[in-house]
Amino acid sequence: MERYSAFGLVKHALTGHKKWPEVWRSPEPKPEYDVIIVGGGGHGLATAYNLAKNYKGKRVAILEKNWIGSGNTGRNTTIVRSDYYYKPSAEFFKYSLSLYGKLSKELNYNVMFSKRGSLTLSHSRDDFDFQRRLVNAMQLNGIDIRHIGLAEIKKICPILNFSKDARYPIYGAMWEPGAGTVRHDAVVWGYARAADALGVDIIQNCEVTGINKDLQTGAVTGLETSRGKINAKTIGLAVAGHSTELAAMAGFRLPIRSMALQAFVSEPVKPVLNTVISSRAISSYASQSDRGGLVMGGGVDPYNSYAQKGNTPVLEEVLSGLIELVPSFSRVRLLRQWAGIVDYTYDSSPIIGPSPVPGLFLNCGWGGGGFKAIPAGGEAFAHLLATGQVPPLVEAFSLSRFKDARLVDEAAGAGIAH
């Protein structure tokens, strides 16, 4: 792999930028690998990279049904944060956020991490008091977050509607200065390039159609795919909203619902929003991209779905709420909308660990929070696939917690769905 650098730009400029090497290979699948990862999104690629980097000598492949990054990683709103209530979640996302800060250097690829902070607004006295309790708990868990009043909010984001007669009057906010945004496509491309350079086979347009198991032990032996049979005794599933479909192929069920989570972007405008703003009361959030578009989102669609497309009721709810918060947004035109298929567990926390089938491991249930979890999730899942041991960072997120009633209910604890 040729390292990207200022010298490289100058060198390739002399040839009209016509001799850049391919960013990653497109190999034919081999008959057998030591480890196969199903899913070519952020978590799958981060897992493959960490496997190849930290556990050398293993033959690793990623199988992606479409093209890499065609799922949720390429369809999110790029926000990264760590404002979680329970200690296992707080420790995990705090670590993941710290890894994002070093990822550009780690991968030799600019992932465009913008440490712009995140404002979560409160709109009533009860909401204000609830946020104060949350902030106290998060600070005890080591999260860099503060509870702030109107004077400081006005300095951070003066375009908000501070009228006392507003439909959603602003009382205060949780302020996480270390949060921000990361370019989603760059995360995919950076991990793919680095994993390929370490020998990982990235096999696109390869759909898994069946999971083969040993008739005596029940352990996995490989996969049936649209490009033939591929054998492996260790298989990791990182397929987000399609996790239940792959689990069904292996003969078990997961406590997961798949839903569409929509996002929207406006036409480019001059810089007006230098932070991330969100409101749980209206279930809306927004930031501004480097290209000037306002990137906006809200809650999931209120029904199960595998559709990667939007609908007008959610569009109306999200945009009307944001216009109440920032009236000047009413003059901006919408450019496009899209949706990802997210996988929600019944306690709104992920599943990382072994499945009921020996040799088959799970990385799923991230809901709308999978993007911010990519660096730490990939590192933890790689350790699990290489050693068979669950790392301490994700012990609380095992599948067995639903049987043992050890839930990590972030929807109830932090008032968020992911």
Image: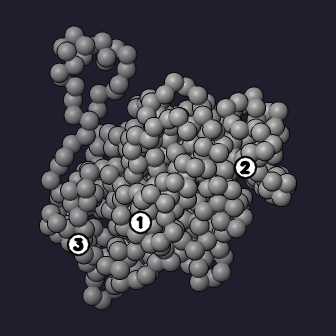
Which amino acid is tagged 3?
A: Thr
Residue in view at x 70 percent, y 67 percent: 412
Q: State how far apart marks 1 and 3 are (Cα).
A: 16 Å
Quadrant of the image for the C terminus? Answer: bottom right
User: Looking at the image, is 346 positioned above or below residue 227?
Assistant: below
The disc placed on residue 168 is 2
Which amino acid is tagged 2?
A: Tyr
Question: Counting other residues with Cα less than 10 Å from the Cα at mark 3, is it few (<14), some (14-19), or many (20 or more)?
Answer: some
Q: Nearer the viewer, residue 222 or 399?
A: 399
Q: Earlier in the sequence, mark 2 or mark 1?
A: 2
Residue in view at x 55 percent, y 39 percent: 330
Question: Counting other residues with Cα less than 10 Å from the Cα at mark 2, is it few (<14), some (14-19), or many (20 or more)?
Answer: many
Q: Residue 189 falls in which quadrant of the image?
A: top left
Residue in view at x 17 percent, y 58 percent: 30
Q: Residue 172 falls in which quadrant of the image?
A: top right
Q: Earlier in the sequence, mark 1 or mark 3?
A: 3
The disc placed on residue 209 is 3
Q: State how far apart marks 2 and 1 are (Cα).
A: 33 Å
The disc placed on residue 241 is 1
Q: Nearer the viewer, residue 406 or 181?
A: 181
Residue 360 rendering spot, x and y as whole percentages? 38, 72
